Amino acid sequence: MPALDLRSLSAMSGLMAVVLGLVLFGVRANFPESIRGLRLWGLAPLLCASSTVLFVLHGVLPAWSLVLGGNGLLMAGFACFLFGSQRFAGVPVSWRPWGAVIAIALSLMAVFLWGLPDYRVRVLIFTSTLALICVFHVRLLLRHCRGFASRLIVGVLSAQALILLARGVSSLWLDSPTSDRFAPSLVQTAYLAAFSFAVLLVSVGVLLMASERLRSEFEHLATHDGLTGAFTRRAALQMADAEMQRWLRQQQPFAVLMLDADHFKQINDVYGHLVGDTVLHDIAAQVIGALRASDRLGRFGGEEFVAVLPATDLAAAVAVAERVVASVRSLPVLPDRPRCTVSVGVAAVQAGDARFDQVLGRADAALYLAKNRGRDQVAIHASAAPVFE
């Protein structure tokens, strides 16, 4: 038989849950507002820890405080883990349905505490309710979250749901109607240890989920322009260099578009820089919408953008560029926003190119050609294939 005291096990797990809950509350202040759910995640282990206070005082406090208060806090704690994940994933928090489920479960447990006293049925009601919360939490994570941390929580909650159901069913023949939580047995020790370990692992998992999201946001900020949502110049050039290396190894073609917002200095001078920022944002949105899923747009500097078009020859690139110009031209003229157009220079990699700047140079020369011809149009450099001249 196990020598581990069940009250001590509950007390230690409760203390560790308190620490993790406080850590989650503490890190919340250092995370951006875009990462939501940390408050609920921090509350969850604290609720679970609060239940251990009641359980440890079993025999001192009245039985109803343990059965209804302690189990109610545990169910609320696991529900808060779920609510935190819902908020984290941007899903509406299901307060009322789960509040009703927990209330019904506690009402049934009260019946089998006072009306028809039976410890085994109370265990089955509690474990089934908690397993249901775990299953819905797993379902949410599989649908809306990615990464190692979410998969860790999925694994822990899935195992916990199976353990809960096994404990509930086994109680019908392993326990008696008058048994209690701290009756010494190998099954109860394993069950409480697994339960405590699950709370700790889920707490660590949600902290890792928040950290993964924070890292993802930092990576996005490092590679994307904050105003337009396009890639930064450095990121765009890295992608272009990758295409160049693919060309040198496999002869896979690619093309480049150089885009410039027409008369942008005049827009800034007449309407102000705030309107100019709005114009750049709207132009970038139109361009991204007109590009293909595989294409990448980067802000090259000021009002100038570069688009990298993988696996694209010159003819296909010209078609994409024409679509981009038409898309920007279709932006409505508003009282606080002038007419917006772009000029586009097109170039494709060709025999003899050994560096990306050779392709970029032709696209840049084509851009100036488009601007000299009157703007709001597409042009290619004279050294490109003659079929387009």
Image (cartoon, rainbow, N blue to C red):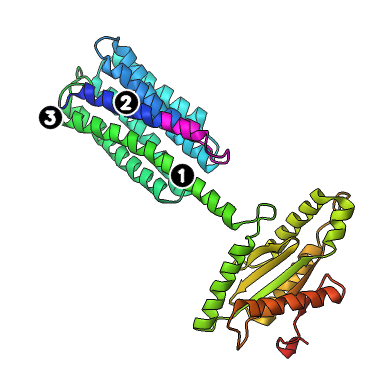
Q: Amino acid at mark 3?
A: Pro
Name the element at disc 1.
helix
Q: Which residue is mark 1?
A: 211
> At 74% from the left edge and 90% from the top edge, which residue is drawn?
386
Q: Position of residue 371 (x, y in %)?
A: 83, 73
* Residue 33 within the segment the image draws in magenta: yes
Locate the C terminus by quadrant. Answer: bottom right
Q: Amino acid at mark 1?
A: Ser
Q: Amino acid at mark 2?
A: Gly
Q: Could you say which disc has been placed on residue 14 in the image? A: 2
Name the element at disc 2.
helix
Q: How many marks?
A: 3
Looking at the image, is 96 positioned above or below residue 256? Answer: above
Residue segment shown in magenta = 22-40
* Residue 91 within the segment the image draws in magenta: no
Compute the Cα span from label 3 to label 1.
38 Å
Q: Quadrant of residue 237?
A: bottom right
